[in-house]
Amino acid sequence: MTDIKTYIAENQSRFLDELFGLIRIPSVSPRPENKPFMKIAAGYISELLLKAGVDHSQVYETPGNPVVYGEKITDKTKPTVLVYGHYDVMPADPLDLWTSPPFEPEIRDNRIYARGANDDKGQMFMHIKAFEYLAKSKKLNCNVKFMIEGEEEVGSAGLKDFCTKNRELLASDIIIVSDTTMATEDTPSITNGLRGICSFEVEVTGPDRDLHSGHYGGAVMNPVNALSKIIAGLTDHQQKITIPGFYDDVEIISDIEREELKKAPFHIEKFKKSIKIPDVYGETGFTVLERIGMRPALDVNGIWGGYSGEGTKTIIPSKAFAKITIRLVPDQDPDKIAALFEKHIKNTAPAGIKVDVKYLHGGKAYVSPIESKGFVSASLAYEKTFGKKPIPIRSGGSIPIISDFESILGVKSVLMGFGLESDAIHSPNENFRIEYLHKGIETITWFYHYFAGVNS
């Protein structure tokens, strides 16, 4: 097993060439015009899997974007690992804030800069290379299946249907995922919890056209003003969400969990400095890490309407819009929260406007037991690679399909992330350290070793 370091060193140039080829495909799922690129990316990954050593690979069409499947069955009596990842990425906007073109990967200071370098092309790629090493060196002691989708950033609707229809094909003992971050660069960690999510678009309509603000101002409700009031009222002075019934099912954080969370490395001044903010902000009575990983949150992701060009244009806009997401915690049901949200928005809207709420997608929170065989195997693998035992952490992010895997496929997932908060995922200048690309490949390789041993 010690040869994995040599294999990475001997093949690192080829690895980067292959990864860069994938990154150059602008597989931006939130934009329908990019659909042709989704098929190109799926085909590219299928070829990577075949070259890595799977017995066969197939691109499955779905109502949305394709799902790539591949497998290598070594012995049906041995444990089966299902690898999940996604090839779709977020839009690269605003483009003017990128130092280099987002879909032309560039290495600076031993980091790969590009959209998807980390989330999730880079991290998913590690699994293909770890498998490649084990398959070619004949050290693979597990059956391996790959399921790589193209809709994670828009809710994974097609994958839910794919899993429901292909339960037997996807049968496994554990699902491993690399789409999360570590606590710090020198503190390995395994994510054992994810927040759920509800995503909405709110449209506010006033007059049937833009109006002269001098002729109508003061007599007609302005949709931008109305939307601002609605959004401002969604939280109170303690930063609690004001939607009636919202907290009814929120998991209560135990004192033991809160004490354990304090062991995670966190320096508030370093945190503020890293994102250049004067102070932190959030729900009264909870620490920053509790707010991020264990409590719900509501955020406006975008708001627009009226005139925003150079100079002035004195109008009352006809419409205003906002994108809003709510992060959920265990026991909250996204469909229930979506209904409560829509009812509250419409109940609090001022007179003189029409409000439409579009529920874009949702997913439940997920918690993985740290005593499971998969988690223990991952912990041993991190310790082997990083030289220290990883700590379990709850992430504030969401991967909605993970909770669906458990309900549809009946299998737990282990979240083996190798990113860092400084990697700027979803932001301009997203990046991934080459060192952690290599460490990820090495750690995943050791995971198979320990998981086969734990289950033998």
Image (cartoon, rainbow, N blue to C red):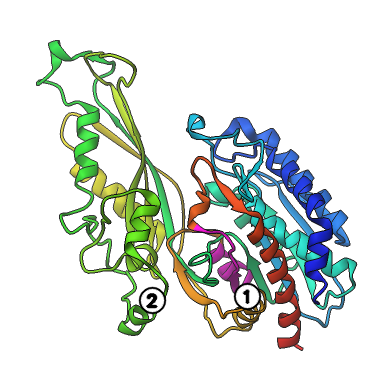
Asked if labels 2 and 1 touch by Cβ distance under 8 angstroms, the answer is no
**Element type where label 1 sits in the image:** helix
Q: Which residue is mark 2?
A: 261
* Observer able to see residue 72: no
Percent position (x, y) of residue 311? 28, 14
Q: Which residue is mark 1?
A: 382
Picture layout, residue 332 above or below residue 273: below
Towards the viewer: 118 or 345: 118
Towards the viewer: 192 or 405: 192
Instruction: Give the residue at the far left of this rendering.
Output: 218
The residue depicted at 50 percent of the width and 40 percent of the height is: 428
Towards the viewer: 67 or 118: 118
Percent position (x, y) of residue 147? 71, 59
Percent position (x, y) of residue 180? 54, 61
The residue depicted at 62 percent of the width and 74 percent of the height is: 386
> What's the magenta region?
402-420
